[in-house]
Image (cartoon, grey):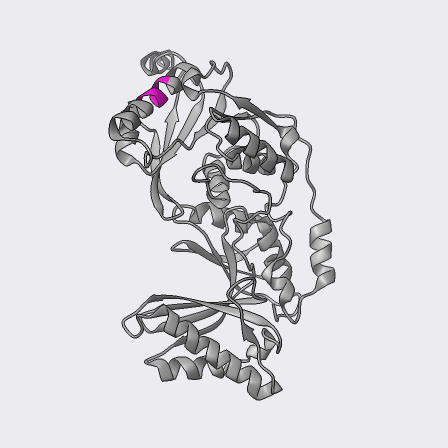
Amino acid sequence: MTQRTHETFEMVAKTFHGLEDVLAKEIRQLGGGDIEILNRAVRYTGDKALLYRSNLYLRTALRILLPVIKTRIKNQVDLYARVREFEWERYVQPGMTMAVDSFLNSTIFTNSHFVSLRVKDAIVDRIREITKRRPSVATTNPDIFINVHLANNELIISVDTSGASLHKRGYRKGDFEAPLNEVLAAGLILLAGWKADTDFYDPMCGSGTLGIEAAFIARNVPPGIFRSKFGFENSPDFEADLWEDIFDSVEERSWNGRIISSDISRQAIQIAMRNAKEAAVHKNIEFQGIDFRKYPKVEKRSLVILNPPYGQRLIKPDIVQFYKEIGDVMKGSFSGSEVWVISSNLEALKFIGLRPADKQTLFNGPLECRLNRYVMYSGSKKEKYKSKQP
């Protein structure tokens, strides 16, 4: 946004609860400095090139915010005054369209729509006073998004440099039931520590998101490579040459490993194959129509990630039986592998009948989920333990 090319400034990358550490690691690998983990976000510093690269490369970021106002307010008069005195002409030009979203945790204001309106009014009045022309408001596809966060009396206003949420990679053309968010899918794979050095299985693939994100990781494909546009491209100081250099420097790698995505539904397989083709990774994924309950035995150590139905459409006896069958297949078909299972049905997870080695809380959209890791030993765990004894 409006910074000199090599000037260092603060950015905030938003993410889902539970993915903050993974996102911080990604940012560190990109070259971010002064990294601080927040609630569902990571704060860091970098230059304009890092801002552009963050939007293109970060797999577990939902959006990249550029904080421009940090202050304390007491009332709506303060709110309007603090916003209007800021140099919005650095970011907003007459004729541009904008949208303002507000997120409140405050006793001063309880109506987020009112706060958004006052912020919008202050920005418009500032631009009109200076240029005699005004920007307009657009609810869809605005040129610039303004993010307002008010916690008690602490006000932070940021320019959203991403535009549409970064989970919208641009490859998903069809959905199957409740799809797995792309950012969460990438986060699951990174949480599992997959290095593309073992086979990857997604036995309930739905619209294919896990397999596609795994292929992106294996081939070093930036998740934003198919996006038509980012918010920062509308900035008055957008550096097209810098962005072109960053985009042209993408180095994908060849990869000959195996990703196996399967589903009982023929419709799901068709949708997953179409999405994989849109993402240009269809040659890296094997699609199979398989009933998970009849899954063939996997002979070599692999990584398996399961996103089973959570049970909203199944009566309790059915979902209990289904999760029991998941446990049976894990023991029979994936011995020697590591299996990760995510579900919002915490009760049903108990019926898998296996003790997870690790578990943590994540969110799939509004749904609170549990992610369990199971280490499936070849033979019995007791025999494996005895074999290590002197």
Q: How many marks?
A: 0
Work out whether 27 lies above or below 111. above
Work out whether 312 lies above or below 159. above
Residue 358 position within the rendered picture, expressed as x and y whole percent measured from the top left = 35, 33
The magenta span reads 324-328
Q: For the point 33% across and 24% down, which residue is it?
A: 322
Residue 66 position within the rendered picture, expressed as x and y whole percent measured from the top left = 52, 65
Residue 112 position within the rendered picture, expressed as x and y whole percent measured from the top left = 36, 69
Q: For the point 51% across and 56% down, which residue is it?
A: 63
Residue 174 position by quadrant: top right
**Quick check: can you spot residue 222?**
yes
Report the predominant secondary structure element of the magenta stretch: helix
- In reply to whether residue 92 is colored magenta, the answer given is no
Q: For the point 39% across and 49% down, which residue is it?
A: 17
Q: For the point 52% across and 37% down, which residue is it?
A: 209
Residue 93 position within the rendered picture, expressed as x and y whole percent measured from the top left = 61, 76
**Quick check: can you spot residue 390?**
no
Q: Which quadrant, please, contains the N terminus? A: bottom right
Work out whether residue 277 or residue 356 is closer to the camera in this orientation and state it. 277
